[in-house]
Image (cartoon, rainbow, N blue to C red):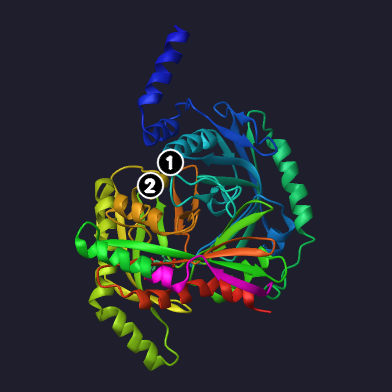
Amino acid sequence: MLTFVAVRSIRDEVTKTGRERWKDTLKGLPPERPVMEQAGNESRPTNVAGGRLVSRTREVSDLSFSAFLASQSAPRVSWATPDGFELVGGDAAATLTATGPDRFDILREDAAALFADSDTDGPPAARPRAIGGLAFDPSHEPAPPWTGFPGALFVVPRIQLTRADDRTWLTVTAAGPDVDPATVTADLDAAHDAITDLPMMRPSGGGPGVTATRRTASKDEWTDGVAAVVERIRAGDLQKVVLATALDVDLASPIDVPGTLERLRRTYPECYRFLVQPTADAGFFGPPPERLVKITGQAVETEALAGSVARGDTPEADADLARSLRTSEKLRHEQALVVDAIRERLAPLGRVEVGERDVRKFANIQHLRTPISATLDDDTHVLDVVEALHPTPAVGGLPPESAREVIHGTEPFDRGWYAAPMGWFDAAGDGEFAVGIRSAVAGGRHARLYAGNGIVADSDPDEEWEELGPKFRPVLDELERE
Ligand SMILES: C=C(O[C@@H]1C=C(C(=O)O)C=C[C@H]1O)C(=O)O
């Protein structure tokens, strides 16, 4: 009888989608396929069906998040939003990884197992979250400069600092079958002792300095690529493709990633700032302006951000540039394709509302932006919505499969995690993701920066080349500054 039940339950699991399995878990049904790696035990997947996630939190006086990050060894994560929420984490209580075309199913399944039995205290802001991201393309293979970055990687930090509403919390989390809450409380006390030595402020220092830069494509190669794509779009089987290029940067001294993030926090407070650093060798970080999705319960917030012009040197010049953005047929078309794709992809999940298009100004660039919100019919996991949206035509193209082929055939490098979803999810399936643009993968004395542009039928290859510069600037400026 018991055997029969077990067999049937495994069969049920096989035919269920990740989302259905996730809902089972919320209903208290145990998931069947737990694959999770425990900290310090990376090679041995652990069955977490009978495991638990225990976290203990206490409020602490404010301290330098950058000093905390610098005091931690990999894996390290950092996440900050334009509305002031900040989180940094070091070490892993649990790590979820996935590769290949089923990576979202694997993630949802492992997330369900991981969060199935959670014992947490503290305020919601400090709850344990899985923070990380995915590769742009499911076929991604980790190779330099992306060593250590699989198709998807999310970390529940062992030690986490959270800052929200002018308050700061320290959280320690452990996961596994034998976790003892008393040990977690003792670990929290030890972590608290350790952070009392950290300063309130850590000088963010100067940039490491740049000794050489190399584009992965010369201007001629880039403009030829753009011209070929324009021709294909005009021939009728494509509407838009976002073509990217990379900039390899040699540094005068090893990069201080926490210091670089701290400087980006001051220069780009209106952007997200993220770091995912799986190993000591390389971290992926940047200040992306673009939200992919935020889900709280059944409320979805997203946006269509596309079409770019520079900022002007004077208020008048700036207003003229904004006007040219608002009135350009080409740029409006480029951005409208993103609005329509997001609306269509969200429609099966709930009721969608598209707001007014406007110009959104950032420190060195302005974009067309349409806010889009939705009310979900169901308790949908944020990973479902990320899977439905990524890649939007703001970073991929239309139709998606043809655009993907063109990207693979044109770009002479692997995008890795560039332009992919970066963010977090929690036990309830809520979460927030940015689009990993204006970003770099860096370690030691080397960084690779990425920038891309949407190409449509009216694109001018020379103008598209000029447009790349401002998209490299956010990270490049911080590397150059002495
Ligand atoms: C692809 C990037 O940015 C995207 C492309 C834009 C464009 O084509 O104008 C604008 C904003 C982003 O959606 C990038 O910054 O690398």
Mark 1: secondary structure: helix
Give ligand 1's quarter of the image.
bottom left
Foreground: 298 or 208? 208
The 10 Å Cα crowd at callout 1, few under 14, some 14 to 19, many 20 or more, is many
User: Residue at 36% across / 42% down in the picture?
Assistant: 379
Residue at (61% x, 40% y) in the render: 94
Tag 2–tag 1 contact (CB < 8 Å): yes
Q: Which residues are magenta?
A: 208-223
Residue at the extreme top of the image, as rendered: 1
Q: Residue 264: where, in percent of width, then height?
A: 58, 71
Q: Quadrant of residue 200?
A: bottom right
Q: Report the residue marked by disc 1.
A: 104
19, above or below 5, in the image:
below
Q: Is residue 227 above or below residue 138?
A: below
Rate crowding at label 2 as few (under 14), some (14 to 19) or many (20 or more) other CA atoms within 10 Å. some
The N terminus: image quadrant: top left
Q: Dividing the picture into quarters, in which one does residue 360 lie?
A: bottom left
- In the image, what residue type sits under mark 2? Glu
Reading the image, the residue beneath label 2 is: 387
Q: Is residue 142 shown left or right of residue 390?
A: right
Q: Position of residue 183 (x, y in %)?
A: 73, 37
Q: Answer left or right for 408 relative to 397.
A: right
> Image point 50% across, 54% down: which residue?
417
Return the x and y of residue 283 as percentages of the image width and height: 61, 57
- Is residue 375 visible in the rendered image? The answer is no
If you read the primary sequence from the N terminus, does the residue marked by circle 2 or circle 1 appear first? 1
Figure disc tally: 2
Q: Is residue 217 magenta?
A: yes
What amino acid is at disc 1? Phe
Q: Quadrant of residue 39?
A: top right
Taking the image as drawn, is residue 234 in sight?
yes
Front residue of 196/264: it is 264
